[in-house]
Amino acid sequence: MHHGKLFGFLLLLLLLQPALALPPLQLYLEITPEGGTLKPPPGEYSGPVVIRKRITLDGGGKVTVNGGGSGSILTIEADGVVVRGLHLSHSGDSHDQVDAGILIKANDTVVQDNIIDDSLFGIHLSNAHGNQVIGNQISSKDRDVTLRGDGIRLWYSHENLIKDNRIKNSRDIVISNSRENRIIGNQMRHSRISMELVFSPENEIRGNVFEDNYNGVTVIYSDDLVIADNRMLDMRKITGFGISVKESYQIKITDNEIAHCAIGLLATSPLEAENILTIENNLFTFNDVATYFYGERGGHKLHYNRFIDNFVDVMGSTTATSRLNHWENNYWDNYQGFDQNHDGIGDQPHRVFLYADRIWMDRSMARFYRGSPALSLIDFVQRLVPSSEPDLMYTDPTPLMQPPLNRPVKD
């Protein structure tokens, strides 16, 4: 059918639509030529919508696509598509089908400055590479956090840029079996897991703000990551943590602010000596436990970090776990030494022993008495007249007298 006849046929269909029905956006897409730009008239249109050719769809901030509560609202199946300025709402409810606001099954697309709400999942990249997802606002459906979908989800998708998106009232950001992606400058609030990486090496997580979620960044079986310049704030739900690393190595954790978390950093010991974490120039402040290390080997490098106003700076599953890490040039607000030669480094190492005030670490029943006057008195007596040599938990041989300068992290 020639384009003129097709246009006339589609126009007739539009005119025959019931007065109260929304015009289908799919018809406008069908008459847009390959490589063309579609700017629909302002208003609300019905979905779902599938883009099967390289076009630009520009809503100008004045076009709403209503998914009708069935499936994904907009699906991109052609490379090089640009979608921007749309309001996408009312997706389906299927977790099995991953009903999303935008489903990307193509390469080299740009999805920018869209608003997605009342959508189970936000943006789902499935076997999609080299895409740019920038400046979108995403929220899920109004239900319990465990029953929502993920704000952004990458599955077998590589070399994508996920930048400056704002996510709230969602579930997680999930990156699964996906490598060499850059997750830069995003914000996520009032959700569950800020970001979960599973079998996803060589990704960069930089300059993001994760606040008031259940947990921060969770890393599982994902090596060679950069986690830098992020802010993990107010992860206090039960055992909420800022960063958790399990069986993942050669990760650089630098210049992050981790504050008001139940656990700031949770990390397992490396299986091999070369498989370590580099933890440098971070701020740990107002956490119940700033760092917790699980295992028996230790070996991680912790340099130039700031430990300020935490209830406990360091814990480990055994005293050897924390003691065998490489502590150097960190600032400890509870260091009790002097700097007589004025070189900025304490004259004596910062040593922390396992006294009575840390009994709650090994005996969960004692948590109730944590910080109590009774436990403080027992601790004072043990320090004053020890009945035996206490276990050494960790030593920083070169504690800093002043906090090292960190690069500011912008909100």
Image (tube, helix red, strand yellow):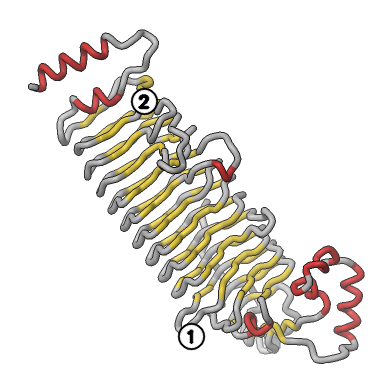
Which quarter of the figure is the N terminus placed in? top left
Q: Is residue 168 above or below residue 293?
A: above
Q: Amino acid at mark 2?
A: Val
Q: Is residue 377 above or below residue 9?
A: below
x, y percent for residue 387? 88, 90
Q: Are marks 2 and 1 in contact (CB under 8 Å)?
A: no
Q: Quadrant of residue 370?
A: bottom right
Q: Residue at x 84, y 91 (%)?
A: 388
Q: Secondary structure at mark 2?
A: strand
Q: Secondary structure at mark 1?
A: loop
Q: Is residue 99 left or right of residue 109?
A: right
Q: Residue at x 80, y 80 (%)?
A: 355
Q: Is residue 320 left or right of residue 130?
A: right
x, y percent for residue 330? 61, 77
Q: Is residue 7 left or right of residue 28?
A: left
Label 2, residues with CA under 10 Å away: few <14, some 14-19, many ≥20: some
Q: Residue at x 50, y 81 (%)?
A: 271
Give me the disc on residue 295: none
Total label count? 2
Q: Amino acid at mark 1?
A: Ala
- The residue to which callout 2 is attached is 63
x, y percent for residue 100? 41, 39
- The residue to which callout 1 is attached is 273
Q: Residue at x 61, y 55 (%)?
A: 233
Label 1, residues with CA under 10 Å away: few <14, some 14-19, many ≥20: few
| Residue nearest the observer in this picture, 329 or 77 | 77
Q: Is residue 16 above or below residue 96?
A: above
Q: Is residue 331 above or below residue 342?
A: above
Structural distance between the alpha carbons of marks 2 and 1: 56 Å
Q: Quadrant of residue 342?
A: bottom right
| Residue nearest the observer in this picture, 291 or 221 | 221
**Which mark lies nearer to you, 2 or 1?**
1
